[in-house]
Amino acid sequence: MHKSLYVKDFMWSENEWPKIRHDDYESGDNMPLISLLEILDGKRESEAYENLCKDMVMACESWGFFKLVDHGIPNVVIESMKERCLGLFDLPMEQKLKGERSSNLPLGYSPTNTDYGHNLPWAESLQLLQSPQQVLTFSKKVFGNEHSPFSDAMLDYMHAMDALGMLIFEMLAHGLGLPHDYFSKNFEEKEATMIRINRYPPCPLPSKCLGLGSHSDPHTLTILLQDEVGGLQVLKKDEEWVGIRPLPNSFIINVGDTLEAWSNGRLKSVVHRAVVNKEKQRFSIAYFLSPASDMVVDSPSQLIDQEKTLKDTFLLHGHNSEES
Ligand code: OGA
Ligand code: NI
């Protein structure tokens, strides 16, 4: 049963209220930007490739985030996915709830996303594992016999995200001085990789509500597609929230907790959130790559040898090292 909810149910405690608006981006404009244009032909033996891998590692060390352009994902894959997902959210609630989490659908649609934070997020979301079977189960529940436009768009998008994720893992591994497949070889099984599609409706009280509370992503790597409305904010080292300006045809990539641990703390999993606004709905798709669930995350010795340097860097930035 779904009880009635009121705006007050979505109000967060005062220390969480966003101090900057959804479209206040200036403070975040120096987030690193990476273009894959020079390496889309697949050639790896170039200076451009070497430099890009290093830039990507540097972005993940300093920001934990970067914007990715010229990513090579066909526009039609992205546009069909957007169209089908927006179409899903536009359905009557009764029909969407057919795809709610249930015994044969462990994730699914939810009118509010209660995974993060203690208060209700001003959002509706669809979460599914990267599993063709789960995508089909969901699509059939909601769309019946007419499920294939939705399920096809979803599966195409997931495959494109997997391929892009593997390229990023290879570049990060290379940039860190590890074998190319150091991370990517653990992603043959896709059982723990998942997608979350978020719709943040216009909110009457955006100064006291949040679309998604502050969190870091637990997975290995996140590939986020956001529309032009804006609302993603990242917590910088000095405890200051910065807004991220939407950029057409781009993705936002961020390091998850697992990759931070895997890289012995070198790549940073950084806290972020989504704020909402009064005028416009906002839409985003997060793809969370995870290795096979029985994989043991162990830092490579190459990175452990660098630990002393790393500790010095930590101290320089004023972080407390937790190790004695
Ligand atoms: C997420 C997330 C941000 C956004 O889904 O984990 O951080 O802008 N989303 O929707
Ligand atoms: Ni997130």
Image (tube, helix red, strand yellow):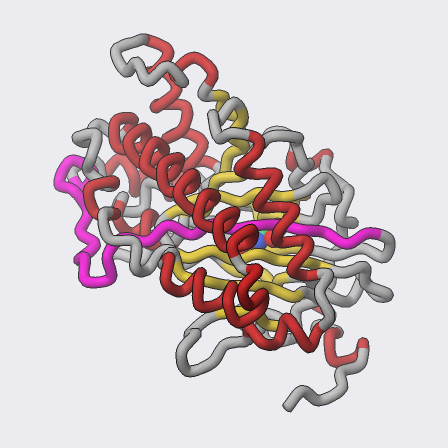
Which percent across, then down, holds residue 92? Answer: 73, 70
Residue 292 painted magenta: yes
User: Is 222 or 301 nearer to us in this picture?
Assistant: 222
Which percent across, then down, holds residue 91? Answer: 71, 65
- Residue at 21 percent of width and 47 percent of height: 186
Residue 186 painted magenta: no
Which percent across, then down, holds residue 107? Answer: 46, 71
- Residue at 34 percent of width and 48 percent of height: 260
Compared to residue 3, the image places residue 236 above or below, namely: above
Res 6 quadrant in image = bottom right
Which quadrant of the rendered structure holds the N terminus? bottom right
- 10 left or right, relative to 271: right
- 50 left or right, relative to 116: left
Which percent across, then down, holds residue 110? Answer: 59, 72
Res 313 quadrant in image = top left
Magenta stretch, residue numbers: 280-304
Q: Residue furthest front?
A: 145
User: Is 63 or 220 nearer to us in this picture?
Assistant: 220
- Residue at 28 percent of width and 16 percent of height: 44
Q: Residue furthest top?
A: 47
Which quadrant of the rendered structure holds the C terminus? bottom left
Compared to residue 186, the image places residue 62 above or below, namely: above
Q: Is residue 2 something that shows in the picture? A: yes
Compared to residue 82, the image places residue 322 above or below, namely: below
Compared to residue 242, the image places residue 11 above or below, namely: below
User: Is 280 or 154 nearer to us in this picture?
Assistant: 154
- Residue at 51 percent of width and 54 percent of height: 148
User: Is 282 or 79 nearer to us in this picture?
Assistant: 79
Q: Is residue 324 something that shows in the picture? A: no
